[in-house]
Amino acid sequence: MSDEPMIAGVELGGTKCICILGSAPGAVIERVRIDTRAPHATLAEIEAVFERWQCEHGFAALGIASFGPLDLDRGSPAFGSIVSTTKAGWSGTALAPRLARFGVPVAIDTDVVGAARAEQRWGAARGMTDLAYITVGTGVGVGAIVGDKPLGGRGHAEMGHLRVPRLAGDEFPGVCSYHRDCVEGLASGPAIAARHGPGPVRDDWPGWAPVEHALAMLVHNIVLSLQPERILIGGGVGGRPGLVESVRDRARASLGGFYTAEGLGEDFLLPAGLGTDAGPLGALALGLQALGR
């Protein structure tokens, strides 16, 4: 078992939330899945889980890894809240202020930064100070760590909403409510569902090509703008067999050996080492950071 302190965490996703209690991948006491519904009902259910854990086990800190965008400006009256999200009904929802009532240190960041921190601490980017984690699921998000700090400025990075060159002949309009054909609008789970229509999506579906192309163009931009040691892909769609390999090949061809892309090996782009656990473990990693661990 881990000798780290007990952390309560929650990964808030567009479809589901995972509450987690533990201190490391091999030291998880309990997980609880909660469907993401309206904010009040969802957060009330999360709070009930934390109340039970505080009574039964106690915890030293709380980590929140949430979909966004988030207000992460500590000088802002809306710090720790979800803002201008594409998730209907959630804009303006306070997370950190509401969960601060448990009386322990609280850390909040985007779900993708949390996953990047988990991969950095326990996974496929262990010990690296410059990395990027891409999640492809309900949305497309990128958690970028540069010089061991999350990329940010006026706000956190939202690279899933970058516009990229489309695959030639791709006329799909995109599904992003803000930008239509950004990467999220072209390659997220809802985009794939809209491209495909009803029924299961087979691995040999031709529609994967423009999805993989959009993700490869995102990788191209991340490589040249952030110069990470490693990029990882996770999420429900990101875990599809063969997707990472196809995106890697397309990105390498697009980069054309330019500058640091010359001689890129297989390990510059890999599946998330923690798999689907990267997200919830990210909440634990953030909670440990709240304690300076």
Image (tube, rainbow, N blue to C red):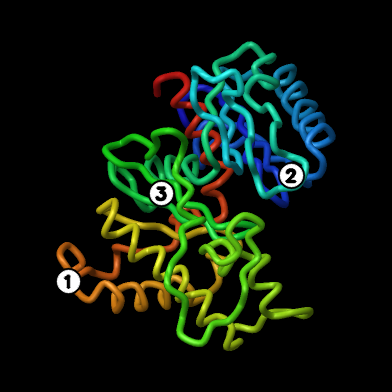
- Crowdedness near tag 3: few (<14), some (14–19) or many (≥20) residues, C-alpha within 10 Å: some
Q: CA distance from mark 3 to mark 2?
A: 22 Å
Q: Secondary structure at mark 3?
A: loop
Provide residue 251's location: percent of width, then percent of height.
34, 72
Towards the viewer: 84 or 263: 84
Query: Would residue 90 be found to the left or right of residue 121 on screen?
Result: right
Q: Is residue 195 visible?
A: yes
Along the line of sight, which residue is nearer the eye, 179 or 284?
179
User: What residue is rendered at 40% in x and 24% in y?
Assistant: 293
Question: Which mark, residue 123?
Answer: 3
- What amino acid type is highlighted by mark number 1? Gly
Q: Residues within 10 Å of mark 1 (few under 14, many from 20)?
A: few
Is 6 placed above or below 35 here? above
Earlier residue among tags 3 and 2: 2
Query: Which residue extends farthest top?
Result: 103
Left or right relative to 288: residue 179: right
Give the labeled residue for mark 2. Answer: 33
Disc 1 versus disc 2: distance between alpha carbons? 42 Å
Left or right? Give the position of 80 relative to 168.
right
Identify residue type, mark 3. Gly
